[in-house]
């Protein structure tokens, strides 16, 4: 029995499960083909309180991180890793809520909670991933405006985004210590988007490049203090990495349940697949590892709710969860035999979708470096 959830969390979980079953699963395969999730889904999600769950009203649904965990887990457990709600609700919205002025929060957060404005965050560049010192996007002060020039890539929700939080260099001489965040709205002159990028997984998630050609934004679009972006990232990344870890664990848990059903029904040489001892051992190992991982992640979630989750523990959560997810899904796919490689079975999509989680939010190698430095 998981103890971090209250009765209101459990009731909300049932609501989220119904929403996924009725509004997402019947259409998800088409969105995978389209390479994008329609904006109408976001408005439906906003109407049902699935966006900005942990923010107070009117900026969100008035819940806490436990409600956000429910949405993260249920989407992943239902094999819908291509739905970009978490970036919107658990990255962009918290940045705005924590760092934004009253005017900035009033301007964007209510419409984000309703799903009318979709949020994205733009940090990664073609030559700058985890190495933020290599960021080349510049923001130059010009009177009451900043002029932003540069390119961002691998931006989740990029095609749909109505608001993008952009990380740019405002003092190149300071390196990583000279970075700042800006709120950039869709439709500004010089701001353009590339087409949805072709990926090996998470096809329903619109991921694209963003281009900034002398984009002028008012000075009041600076988010937080000037040259404080690196410090803000260090604080907020723990939440992002835990969210990725929770997605990874729930994805593997969902596929374990699906594989248990498959191995009970599928027969090979006159016996059910689950009747072979080796296959039961594979399932037993998966169940044991995921149970142990779940206890750790629940403790991490509780720490985040209490405001005590540190970056090193968050890095350990992401490293372990995503690596375990990849290993377990590979084993579960093998139990499906040839059908595991078929697009008609969920395990194949889950396996392909999962690969990105060992890269997003800082690769496994970066997580090991963060942990290693703490030793």
Image: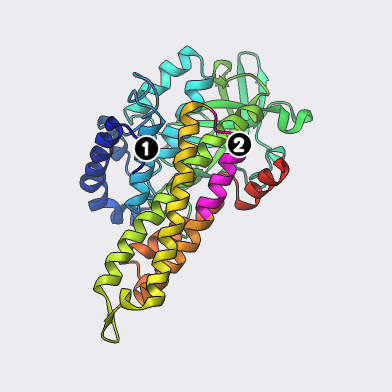
Residue carrying label 1:
3
Label 2: which secondary element = helix
Magenta stretch: residue 310 in it? yes
Residue 196 shows in the view: no
12 relative position to 141: left or right: left
In this view, 58 is above or below 118:
above
Question: Which of the two labelled residues, at mark 1 and mark 2, occupies the earlier sequence position?
Answer: 1
Identify the residue at horizontal 66%, vertical 45% (top origin): 371
In the rendered image, the quadrant that contains the C terminus is top right
**Percent from the top left, x then y, of residue 364?**
60, 52
Identify the residue at horizontal 34%, vertical 35% (top origin): 5
Distance between mark 1 and mark 2 Cα atoms:
23 Å
The quadrant where residue 218 appears: top right
Q: Main secondary structure of the magenta part?
A: helix
The span shown in magenta is 308-322
240 relative position to 138: left or right: left
Residue carrying label 2:
311
Label 1: which secondary element = loop
């Amino acid at each position: 029995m998981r103890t971090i959830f209250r009765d209101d969390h459990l009731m909300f979980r049932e609501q989220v499960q119904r929403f996924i079953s009725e509004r997402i699963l019947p259409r998800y395969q088409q969105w995978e083909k389209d390479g994008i999730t329609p904006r109408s889904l976001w408005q439906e999600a906003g109407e049902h309180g699935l966006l900005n769950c942990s923010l107070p009203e009117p900026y969100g649904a008035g819940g806490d991180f436990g409600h956000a965990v429910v949405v993260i887990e249920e989407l992943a457990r239902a094999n819908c890793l291509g739905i970009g709600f978490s970036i919107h609700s658990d990255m962009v919205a918290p940045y705005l809520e924590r760092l934004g002025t009253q005017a900035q929060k009033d301007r964007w957060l209510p419409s984000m909670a309703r799903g009318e404005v979709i949020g994205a965050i733009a940090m990664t560049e073609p030559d700058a991933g985890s190495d933020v010192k290599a960021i080349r996007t510049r923001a130059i002060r010009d009177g009451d405006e900043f002029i932003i020039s540069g390119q961002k890539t691998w931006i989740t929700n990029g095609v749909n985004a109505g608001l993008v939080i952009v990380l740019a260099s405002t003092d190149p001489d300071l390196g990583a210590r000279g970075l700042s965040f800006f709120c950039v709205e869709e439709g500004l002159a010089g701001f353009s988007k590339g087409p949805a990028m072709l990926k090996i997984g998470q096809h329903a998630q619109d991921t694209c490049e963003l281009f900034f050609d002398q984009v002028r934004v008012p000075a009041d679009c600076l988010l937080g203090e000037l040259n404080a972006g690196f410090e803000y990232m260090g604080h907020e990344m723990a939440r992002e990495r835990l969210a990725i870890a929770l997605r990874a664990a729930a994805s593997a848990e969902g596929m374990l349940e699906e594989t248990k059903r498959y191995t009970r029904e599928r027969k090979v040489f006159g016996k059910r697949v689950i009747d072979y001892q080796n296959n039961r051992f594979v399932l037993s190992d998966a169940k044991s590892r995921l149970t142990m991982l779940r206890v750790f992640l629940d403790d991490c979630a509780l720490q985040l709710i209490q405001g005590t989750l540190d970056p090193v523990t968050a890095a350990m959560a992401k490293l372990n969860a995503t690596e375990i997810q990849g290993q377990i899904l590979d084993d579960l796919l093998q139990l499906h035999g040839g059908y595991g490689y078929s697009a008609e079975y969920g395990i194949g999509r889950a396996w392909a979708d999962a690969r990105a989680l060992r890269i997003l939010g800082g690769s496994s190698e970066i997580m090991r470096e963060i942990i290693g430095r703490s030793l």
